[in-house]
Amino acid sequence: DEKSLSLSAGGYLNLAADSMHNFTDGIAIGASFVGGKSVGIAMTLSVLVHELPHEIGDFAILIQNGAKPSQAIMLQFCTAFFAFAGTALGLTSANYDNMSEMLLAIVSGGFVYVATMTVLPELQVGKSSLGQIVLEVGAFSAGVGMMVVVAQLE
């Protein structure tokens, strides 16, 4: 039956995580537009670029966890509504002093945390060579450094 949905726990966890992820992306977009049109457009484009492969991966996870392709697409659309809610919150921050900056700091910190938690476990398991560890830590540090430079130039 096409209408029945039987997802395993991993599918539901992915939906919850994707909903939260989309909500924070929306906050970033909305709060960025509060900072200026060009900042908002830049944030929107960067979110779009990182979301395309992310959503394809989420689609595959939903299929692997029991969703039919049409169900997985509809579930992905449902999680996208959280991005609109986050955008509304981000745009509302224009009504409060320094709230957009606070929201962007929280969201940026969350992104750095997720990136760190993705990289560090691999480095700690010992699968990587010393050269690979140096390369990954260097690339991560360069990314953080670029964020600091951009923040200083604004």
Image: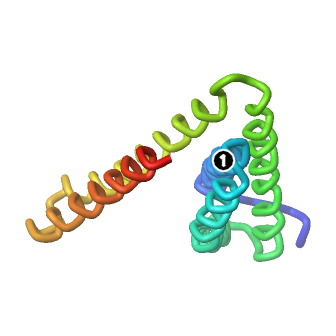
Tag 1 secondary structure:
helix
Tell me, yes or no, if residue 19 can be seen here: no
Left or right? Give the position of 50 relative to 113.
right
Q: Quadrant of the N terminus?
A: bottom right
Seen at 75% across and 60% down, the residue is 6
Left or right? Give the position of 54 relative to 6.
left
Give the quarter of the image for residue 40: bottom right
Which of these two is toward me, 53 or 40?
Answer: 40
Q: Is residue 78 above or below residue 69?
A: above
Tell me, yes or no, if residue 14 can be seen here: yes
Left or right? Give the position of 50 relative to 88.
left
Q: Is residue 99 above or below residue 17?
A: above
Seen at 30% across and 58% down, the residue is 140
Farthest residue in the top direction?
Answer: 97
Q: Which residue is mark 1?
A: 32
Which of these two is toward me, 98 or 113?
Answer: 98
